[in-house]
Image (tube, rainbow, N blue to C red):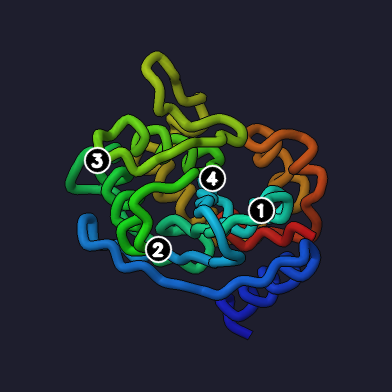
C-alpha cells in the first residue's frame, strides 16, 4: 500500500468515527501556483477549516462534526495531508499565504467564508482577514495563531527550523514516523492537552496522524 493509500484509509476511519461523509475536491491556485486539497461535507453557509503546521486537515474532525447546517470544507494546505508541497519563496510569506487562501476561496466559488483555523492556518487566516479583499466573514482560532499579530514571537524551536541546516534536517524528519508521545507533546502546544490526548497510533509529522 502506498503512503497516499494508507493516508486515505486513515482519513476514512477518522471520518467514520465522527460520522462525516465528504467528497474530495482539488483547487488549482494561480498566484502562487499551488494545489490545495479540500474535503467537502454538508450544505449551507460555508465554514472553512485550516490545518496547523505538520497536521492534516482531517485532524480538525472533532470540531467539524460539531457543526450542523453548514457546508464544511476541510483544507489540506500545501505540503500537508495529500496536498503537494510548496517552497514558500519568491515573495514575502504573508503575501503568498494571502494569495493561497484568496485563490482557494475564489476556486471554491466563495466570495466570503467563516474560517476555523489552527496554528499556521490561524496565522494565514488572520493575514487574509487583514487584507482589503473582505473574504473573511469571521474567524475561530484554535490554539496559537502562529506569529500573525504585531509583537508576537515564534518560540526558539520554530525559529531554529528556519535556519538552512536545521531546516533541511527538519524537512527530512517530517517524512519519518514519529512516536505517539512525541506527536502528542507537539500537538499539546498548539491544540491543547485535551485534543492531544485523543491521538492514537503512530504518526508522521507531514500529516500522517491517526486521530482515532
Please determine whether, in this image, residue 175 is positioned above or below residue 24.
above
Depth check: give the residue in front, 138 or 154. 138
Circle 3 Cα neighbour tier, 10 Å, few/some/many (<14 / 14–19 / ≥20): some
Per the rendering, the mark at residue 36 is: 2
Q: Which residue is mark 1?
A: 64
Between disc 4 and disc 1, the foreground one is 1
Q: CA distance from mark 2 to mark 1?
A: 19 Å
Q: Residue at 32% of width from left, 63% of height from top?
A: 107
Secondary structure of the residue carrying numbered label 4: loop
Q: Which residue is mark 4?
A: 52
| Number of residue marks | 4
Between disc 2 and disc 4, the foreground one is 2
Q: Position of residue 64 (x, y in %)?
A: 66, 53
Q: Locate residue 163: give its quadrant.
A: top left
Q: Position of residue 159 (x, y in %)?
A: 43, 30
Per the rendering, the mark at residue 95 is: 3
Q: Position of residue 70 (x, y in %)?
A: 59, 56
Circle 4 Cα neighbour tier, 10 Å, few/some/many (<14 / 14–19 / ≥20): many
Tell me, yes or no, whether the two marked residues, 2 and 4, touch with CB atoms within 8 Å. no
In the image as oriented, which residue stretches furthest toward the left? 90
Mark 3 or mark 1: whose residue is earlier in sequence: 1
Q: CA distance from mark 2 to mark 3?
A: 17 Å
Please determine whether, in this image, residue 198 is positioned above or below residue 21.
above
Q: Residue at 74% of width from left, 57% of height from top?
A: 211
Query: Is residue 54 left or right of 104 when viewed as pictured?
Result: right
Q: CA distance from mark 3 to mark 4?
A: 18 Å
Mark 2 or mark 1: whose residue is earlier in sequence: 2
Query: Is residue 37 left or right of 44 when viewed as pictured?
Result: left
Mark 2 or mark 4: whose residue is earlier in sequence: 2
Q: Residue at 68% of width from left, 51% of height from top?
A: 67
Tell me, yes or no, whether the two marked residues, 3 and 4, touch with CB atoms within 8 Å. no
Query: Is residue 125 left or right of 199 when viewed as pictured?
Result: left
Amino acid at each position: 500500500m502506498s503512503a497516499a493509500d494508507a493516508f486515505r484509509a486513515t482519513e476514512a476511519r477518522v471520518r467514520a468515527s465522527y460520522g462525516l461523509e465528504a467528497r474530495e475536491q482539488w483547487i488549482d491556485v494561480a498566484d502562487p501556483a499551488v494545489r490545495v486539497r479540500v474535503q467537502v461535507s454538508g450544505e449551507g453557509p460555508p465554514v472553512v477549516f485550516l490545518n496547523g503546521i505538520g497536521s492534516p486537515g482531517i485532524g480538525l474532525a472533532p470540531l467539524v462534526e460539531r457543526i450542523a447546517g453548514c457546508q464544511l470544507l476541510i483544507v489540506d494546505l500545501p505540503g500537508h495531508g495529500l496536498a503537494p508541497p510548496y517552497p514558500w519563496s519568491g515573495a514575502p510569506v504573508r503575501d503568498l499565504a494571502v494569495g493561497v487562501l484568496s485563490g482557494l476561496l475564489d476556486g471554491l466559488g466563495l466570495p466570503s467564508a467563516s474560517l476555523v483555523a489552527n496554528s499556521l492556518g490561524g496565522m494565514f487566516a488572520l493575514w487574509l482577514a487583514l487584507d482589503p479583499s473582505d473574504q473573511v466573514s469571521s474567524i475561530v482560532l484554535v490554539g496559537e495563531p502562529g506569529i500573525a499579530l504585531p509583537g508576537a514571537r515564534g518560540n526558539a524551536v520554530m525559529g531554529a527550523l528556519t535556519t538552512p541546516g536545521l531546516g533541511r534536517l527538519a524537512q527530512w524528519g517530517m517524512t519519518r514516523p514519529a512516536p505517539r508521545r512525541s506527536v502528542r507533546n507537539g500537538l499539546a502546544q498548539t491544540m491543547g492537552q485535551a485534543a492531544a490526548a485523543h491521538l492514537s497510533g503512530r504518526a508522521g509529522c507531514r500529516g500522517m496522524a491517526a486521530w482515532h
